Image: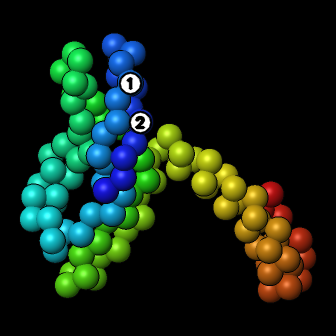
Amino acid sequence: MAIRRITCFCEHQFDADVADVVDLGVDADAERRILAGEFMDVSCPLCGKVLKPEFPCRIRHDARGIDIAFFPSSIGSRICAESFRLVAPVASRSATRAFGKDRSFA
């Protein structure tokens, strides 16, 4: 668990204990919360609003061979863009070697 600073719609800021790693083999209720859309839900202590913060999280279950790195859409696009920026030049060079002409990905 990680302590995260949350800002509610009522503008109240508070610290919440939010999972950064979830082991489905240990936390029996985690899979139900994920499937029900209740995962990482926190309630504002001032107004009571249920918030759904989006933070990166690792979800695992060793016995079932599950190991997932979850990146919410709010940061996932930045990660994809940075990965593409780093990989595209290498992919272009590999395609040129494989096909004999420039196949630019950028």
Q: Neighbour class for label 1 at 10 Å: few (<14), some, many (≥20)?
A: some
Q: Secondary structure at mark 1?
A: strand
* Front residue of this view, candidates 10 and 63: 10
Q: Residue at x 75, y 64 (%)?
A: 86
- Which residue is under mark 2? 5
Residue at image position (34%, 29%) is: 14
Residue 98 drawn above or below residue 71:
below
Residue 4, placed above or below residue 70: above
Amino acid type assigned to the residue bearing label 1 in the image: Gln
Residue 93 pos. (x, y %): 85, 77
Quadrant the N terminus occupies: bottom left
Residue 51 % position (x, y): 28, 30
Q: Could one spot residue 92 in this view of the protein?
A: yes
Q: Position of residue 46 (x, y in %)?
A: 23, 18
Q: Does residue 18 appear to the left or right of 98 in the view shown? A: left
Pointer 2: residues within 10 angstroms few (<14), some, or many (20+)? few
Where does label 1 land, which residue? 13
Tell me which numbered mark, 2 or 1, is placed earlier along the sequence: 2
Q: Is residue 10 above or below residue 2?
A: above
* Residue contact between numbered discs 2 and 1, judged by CB atoms under 8 Å: yes
Q: Amino acid at mark 2?
A: Arg
The label on residue 92 is none
Q: Position of residue 91 (x, y in %)?
A: 76, 73
Residue drawn at point x = 80 percent, y = 57 percent: 106
